[in-house]
Image (tube, rainbow, N blue to C red):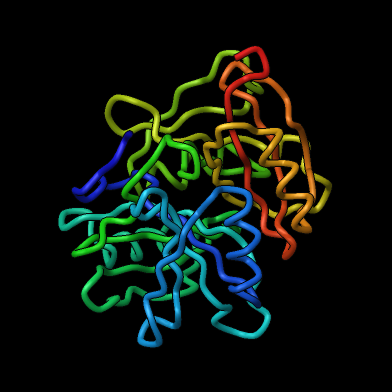
């Protein structure tokens, strides 16, 4: 079981959360899809709910923080004492991004900001203290991949290279504008075009969650009021489907192919 107890390297997708109008309903929906259990952090943290797999943090769900806030999954990229949140925030602004939430301390946990990249895709930056972010990964119910969908992938790659130092590699069999992003060694995620999204869809990040059975996850999602955007389809990387929850938040599931 892949687990982690040390802070994630800077630039690594390290956390994902969702803010919704009705956290109780969201817990019911995602509990059915992923089998999550939930840890309520209490009133001091706005009843932010840690979604757990085998008692380890996999994601979080919280109540909307402001009127008009969209309900969407937000991917957080790790920072550290060298590449700190405040420095990253300055770099985001200097490269055409916009800060939605200035760097702030989360007492006893870490430091963070939330921003839009130069094309308007929302993401967060997390500097770990006591809380590292994801504690389990590449297991059913946990994150397995993140990618950024961009109307101008080359411009997006330049933005993230300037801010996080990413390098990029093409992916055999993927659309020609899709690349993985790296710092050292293995790919950290992907970045490409809108990949068939309806016209007018804004730039955004997508979180992919591992599941034991993609078809069963789709069935649970639709039974709970979610919608299917695409799939499930077998790919060289697993059987994948793209879904929305009842509030319209987009996410993907990835499981073994139908041939095993």
What percent of the width, then of the height, locates residue 207?
Answer: 54, 46
| Image quadrant containing the N terminus | top left
Q: Is residue 113 left or right of residue 245?
A: left
Residue 32 to residue 167: above or below = below
Instruction: Give the number of callouts.
Output: 0
Q: Is residue 184 left or right of residue 60?
A: left
Q: Is residue 79 left or right of residue 243?
A: left
Q: Residue at x 57, y 58 (%)?
A: 73
Res 226 quadrant in image: bottom right
Residue 105 to residue 54: above or below = below
| Image quadrant containing the C terminus | top right
Viewer-closest of 244 and 162? 244
What percent of the width, then of the height, locates residue 230?
Answer: 77, 37
Q: Is residue 68 left or right of residue 45?
A: right
Residue extending farthest right: 199
Res 234 quadrant in image: top right
Q: Residue at x 25, y 68 (%)?
A: 110
């Amino acid at each position: 079981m892949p687990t982690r107890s040390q802070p994630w390297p800077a630039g690594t997708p390290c956390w994902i959360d969702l803010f919704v109008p009705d956290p109780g309903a969201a817990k019911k929906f995602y509990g059915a899809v992923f089998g999550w259990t939930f840890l309520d952090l209490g009133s001091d943290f706005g009843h932010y709910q840690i979604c757990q797999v085998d008692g380890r943090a996999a994601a979080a769900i919280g109540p909307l923080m402001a009127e008009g806030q969209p309900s969407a999954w937000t991917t957080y990229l790790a920072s550290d004492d060298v590449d700190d949140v405040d420095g990253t925030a300055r770099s985001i602004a200097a490269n055409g991004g916009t800060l939605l939430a200035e760097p702030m301390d989360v007492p006893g946990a870490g430091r963070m900001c939330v921003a839009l990249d130069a094309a308007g895709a929302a993401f967060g930056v997390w500097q770990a203290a006591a809380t590292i972010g994801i504690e389990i990964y590449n297991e059913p119910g946990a994150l397995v991949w993140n990618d950024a969908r961009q109307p101008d992938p080359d411009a997006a790659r330049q933005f993230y290279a300037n801010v996080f130092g990413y390098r990029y590699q093409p992916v055999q069999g993927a659309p020609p504008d899709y690349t993985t992003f790296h710092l050292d060694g293995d790919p950290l995620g992907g970045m490409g075009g809108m990949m068939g999204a309806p016209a007018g869809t804004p730039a955004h990040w997508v979180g992919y969650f591992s599941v034991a059975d993609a078809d069963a996850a789709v069935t649970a999602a639709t039974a709970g009021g979610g919608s299917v955007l695409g799939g499930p389809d077998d790919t060289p990387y697993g059987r994948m489907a793209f879904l929305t929850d009842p509030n319209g938040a987009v996410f993907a599931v990835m499981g073994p192919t139908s041939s095993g």
